[in-house]
Image: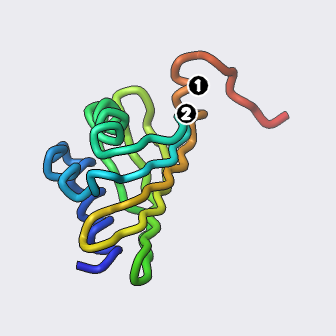
């Protein structure tokens, strides 16, 4: 599989609840830079991702592109708490497994849902 194939399959698996199968596409030594900080190892990434994956109601791939070693995915998710939670992930893939992940996502929808911030209105 190409890098983009591996990444798309990983996204499909974790967003549909096939978590053990998704984690199998991660290197045991995967490193993940996330809004929560750096995570090292498959178990740490799985522990970080599993609660969010468990809250999903749906997801939609918006774009995906890649080269020989990397893939970039842009997607939107719907959770029980928020209607739209957009995110992007940059993966490095070696020998059919993801060796590094950089996750960027919008925390604002969750802050709004919790009431931590007030919505901005055009004035």
Q: Residue at x 27, y 55 (%)?
A: 26
Which dot marks residue 46? Answer: none
Residue 78 vertical placement versus 89 (above, below): above
Q: Residue at x 34, y 28 (%)?
A: 80
Q: Looking at the image, can residue 96 be seen?
A: yes
- Crowd band around label 2 with a 10 angstrom C-alpha radius: few (<14), some (14–19), many (20+): some
**Colouring method of the image:** rainbow
**In this orientation, which residue lies closer to the viewer: 38 or 113?**
38
Q: At 21% across and 52% down in the image, what residue appears? A: 22
Q: Residue furthest bottom?
A: 68
Crowdedness near tag 1: few (<14), some (14–19) or many (≥20) residues, C-alpha within 10 Å: some
Give the residue displayed 52% in from the left and 34% down from the top.
36
Q: Is residue 94 above or below residue 13?
A: below
Q: Which mark is residue 112?
A: 1
The image quadrant that residue 54 belongs to is top left
* Side of 71 relative to 58 (left or right): right
Q: Position of residue 39 (x, y in %)?
A: 44, 41
Q: Is residue 57 visible?
A: no
Q: Position of residue 123 (x, y in %)?
A: 85, 34
SS at mark 2 in the image: helix
Q: Quadrant of the N terminus?
A: bottom left
Q: Are marks 1 and 2 in contact (CB under 8 Å)?
A: yes
Residue at the disc numbered 2: 109
Q: Residue 88's spot in the image, x, y percent?
A: 49, 56
Number of numbered discs visible in the structure rendering: 2
Using the rendered view, name the quadrant where residue 77 is placed.
Answer: top left
Q: Nearer the viewer, residue 60 or 27?
A: 27
């Amino acid at each position: 599989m190409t890098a983009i194939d591996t990444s798309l399959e990983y996204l499909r698996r974790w967003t549909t609840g096939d978590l053990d199968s998704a984690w199998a596409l991660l290197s045991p030594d995967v490193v993940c830079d996330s809004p929560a900080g750096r995570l090292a190892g498959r178990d740490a990434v799985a522990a970080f991702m599993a609660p969010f994956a468990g809250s999903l109601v749906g997801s939609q791939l918006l774009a995906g592109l890649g080269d020989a070693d990397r893939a970039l995915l842009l997607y939107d998710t719907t959770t029980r708490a928020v209607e739209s939670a957009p995110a992007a992930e940059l993966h490095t893939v070696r020998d059919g497994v993801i060796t590094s992940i950089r996750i960027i996502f919008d925390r604002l929808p969750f802050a709004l849902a919790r009431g931590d911030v007030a919505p901005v209105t055009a004035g």
